[in-house]
Amino acid sequence: MINFNYESTFTLDNEDSYATWLSAVIVSENKKEGEINYIFCDDEYLHKINLEYLNHDTLTDIISFDYSVGNELNGDIFISIERVQDNANDFEVTFEQELKRVLAHGILHYCGYKDKSDSESLLMRKKEDEKILMFHVEH
């Protein structure tokens, strides 16, 4: 089950469409959907998590805690809406496009994709782009 939680004033439009898409992303990687919680927050909230749990004194757009068991994906994915907006501006893409990238990014980490090296980052970006193309809004 995909859950959306809010620790900021941001709310996601079309939650059902996003949940359906993220479920399809999981299936496309031959994984099973467990319980995945997205928590939308601001920079301050995510910075505190980064310091407390990872000992990183930096701002970031996403932190994911992976509780997956075998092929079943489970975890908590924290997303700073402020970072997503800043990154969208920096990369000259829409906020929605950057948000989809980050949403998919968390799932892809659970699927085993990394982004520490240049080659890993390149594959991660390719996978993100591939998964973004799977998004369809029901009208």
Image (tube, rainbow, N blue to C red):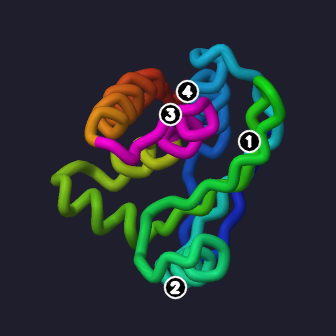
Is 51 located above or below residue 119 in the figure?
A: below
**Dot 4 surroundings within 10 Å: few (below 14), some, or many (20 or more)?**
few
Describe the element under mark 3 as helix, strand or loop: loop
Q: Along the line of sight, which residue is nearer the eye, 44 or 55?
A: 55
Q: Is residue 133 above or below residue 42?
A: above
Give me the disc on residue 100: none
Pointer 1: residues within 10 angstroms few (<14), some, or many (20+)? some
The residue at 45%/26% (across/down) is: 131
Vertical relation: 8 (above or below) 134? below
Kindly indicate the quadrant of the structure image that contains residue 97.
top left
Outermost residue, front side: 117
Which of the two discs, 4 and 1, sits closer to the camera? Answer: 1
Which residue is located at x 47 percent, y 28 percent? 135
Residue matched to label 3: 113
Q: Which residues are magenta?
A: 104-117
Real-space Cα separation, disc 3 to disc 1, in angstroms: 20 Å
Instruction: Determine the CA span between mark 3 and mark 2.
Output: 27 Å
Residue tagged 2: 44
Q: Which comes sooner in the sequence, label 2 or label 4?
A: 2
Callout 3, which amino acid? Tyr
Mark number for residue 2? 1
Q: Amino acid type of disc 4?
A: Glu
Tag 1: amino acid: Ile
Q: Residues within 10 Å of mark 2 (few under 14, many from 20)?
A: few
